[in-house]
Amino acid sequence: MRFILVPLLFLSIFSKAQNPYPQDYFRNPLDIPIVLAGTFAELRSNHFHGGLDIKTQQRVGLKVHASASGFVSRIKISHYGYGKALYITHPNGYTSVYGHLQHFNPEIEAYIKKLQYKKESYEVEVFPQAGELPVNQGDIIAYSGNTGGSGGPHLHFEIRDKEEHPINPMLFGFDIKDTSKPIISDLYAYPLGDSSYVNNSTVKQKLRLIPIKSGDYVVENIEAYGDIGFAVGTTDRQDLAANKNGVYNIQTFINGNENFELNFKSFGFDETKYINRLIDYEVYKTKRQRVQKLFVDNNPLSLFDSVINNGVIKIKDSTYSVYKIRVSDFKKNDTWVTLTIKGEKNNSVKFTSPKTTPYYIYANQTTNLKEGRVSVDMYPDTFYDDFYIDFHVDNDTLKLDKDTIPLKKSIKISYDVSNYSDEDKNKLYIAELLGYKNFPAYSSTKRNGNNLYTFTKTLGTYALTMDDEKPSVKPINFKDGQWLSNFRYLKLKIDDDLSGISNYRATVNGKWILMEYDYKTKTLIHDFNDGVVTDTKNNLKVIVTDNVGNSSTFESVFYRK
């Protein structure tokens, strides 16, 4: 067996090495070497990362080039997400995506600002026709930035196929220096059957990883019986970056035979809801560690490959099994974990009964929970499993279990507010209470008569909250009555401590002006180069409204010539 084991492993590993993607079609979208802040399909909050995050040396304003010839097929500007984003469709059917941009090249900038002024909205989305905005490979299409949900200056870069599925850009020949092996930080073992256990326990066990000189790991031998699964916490690090990124491939082997593979080559955006089933959601929420299950736990992800028996290991009494995990980055640097499992049936193991409550959720059925003036509607296929749920209402506070159970789709929480005065009804919203201080985080709330409701994909504690405070609006770089002839920008700071900013509107001499809102810095910025402010004396009026309708009006006069 010793002579058969190694060829089987390496035949499995390298038999899938063929790459069907063009290697010289796309160029680096920047003029600097690619150094990554984030890798493809990296595990993020509630989603897989759809591309590469390319570092821009902690700067904004770097030239962004068309990675290949084609035409601008979509432009989307939003306060969150990709911020200012540009999409280029190429003749070979692929689409490249550029996100978190500072601004576009002059032609595209004029095109999109015309639309923004027409719609009187900063947030716009448009799908130009093939002949409107053609580009050649290498053309400057934009400048890198930090817009939207970016945590720092970088360029988000994607390649999508005809079905809009993102594909790992590394498969197209981008070269990134990486000679480091992936890091393995955590390993868990899971008893998966009613009569299964690990080290005489029926609950999951964190196993101790022991590093060896090769950079691989071994694990203290374990005793187990029945159906067993594992989960691994792992990251990768490229040579020119200190940050930790995601890995490219994870395989497992039992007694020399591959039984599971997780391959980060491509996925569909509709699959992102399953990420919280791939990771151990409870470990993530309680310990802030993302460990990936190495078994298919009622999860239809397309990332799974070469799965036998759902990746579950069946351990029989009086046996010895060798379980191996291989974690690889794109450059084929790999790290191995090896552990020996002794099959040991123990009739003295105590099986603990799961918690019970008066409320049981059937995953394939509609459930309505109601107490007092609060009700919760749960729809079929919201949860992965049947389970007992904690449900309790105390005045206007709803305790709906803990945020340790993942949801596939939203549930509806409703409050009957008929006992409130009409004035108070207009100031109420539903908030999720977060942290040990129970900070009230606004949950998008709608009203239908005396009913307030919200949709959420998170269990936890919710409460009816009141916001009767107006947003604040303050000038940053000017004063009332000031001459601003030499100013490029007009800046204000807006904020709301409770329900949050809903919308804003700015006018000069009664005409709408474009102001860009950066929620991270809470600033509104107008660029005088737009050319819409042409008078000498200008009356500025900014109206800011929060999510329950409280509004503040800021007015000022400034002069330009």
Image (tube, rainbow, N blue to C red):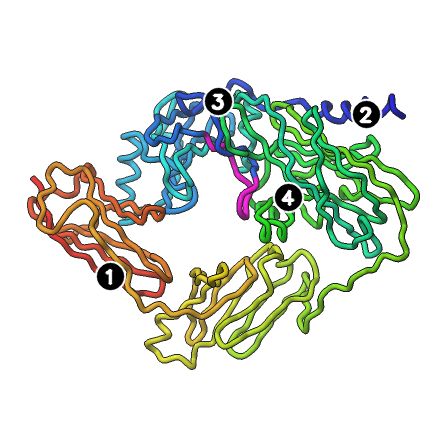
Q: Secondary structure at mark 3?
A: loop
- Which of the two discs, 4 and 2, labels the residue nearer the N terminus? 2
Task: Tell me the element at label 1.
Answer: strand
Which marked residue is nearer to the observer: mark 1 or mark 4?
4
Q: Amino acid at mark 1?
A: Ser
Q: Residue 52 lies in magenta, yes or no?
A: yes
Q: Earlier in the sequence, mark 3 or mark 1?
A: 3
Specify the quadrant that holds the C terminus: top left
Which one is closest to the eye, mark 4 or mark 3?
A: 4
Q: Which mark is residue 8?
A: 2
Q: Is residue 34 above or below residue 391?
A: above
Judging by the rendered image, the residue that carries numbered circle 3 is: 26
User: Mark 3, mark 1: which one is toward the viewer?
Assistant: 1
Instruction: Give the number of the disc on residue 552.
Output: 1
Structural distance between the alpha carbons of marks 2 and 3? 36 Å
Which residue: 75% across, 38% down?
Answer: 307
Q: Which of 254/544 is in front? A: 254
Q: Earlier in the sequence, mark 1 or mark 4?
A: 4
Q: What are the residue bounds of the magenta stretch?
A: 43-54
Camera-side mark, 4 or 2: 4
Is 159 on the left or on the right of 11, as rendered? left
Name the residue at the top extreme: 24
Residue type, mark 4 in image: Val
Instruction: Locate residue 556, reporting x and y percent.
Output: 13, 53
Q: Position of residue 388 (x, y in %)?
A: 68, 66
Which quarter of the rendered picture does the N terminus lie within? top right
Residue 114 located within the stretch drawn in magenta: no
Specify whether 10 is left or right of 558: right
Task: Report the side of 252 relative to 547 (left or right).
Answer: right
Residue matched to label 4: 291
Mark-to-mark CA distance, 4 and 3: 33 Å
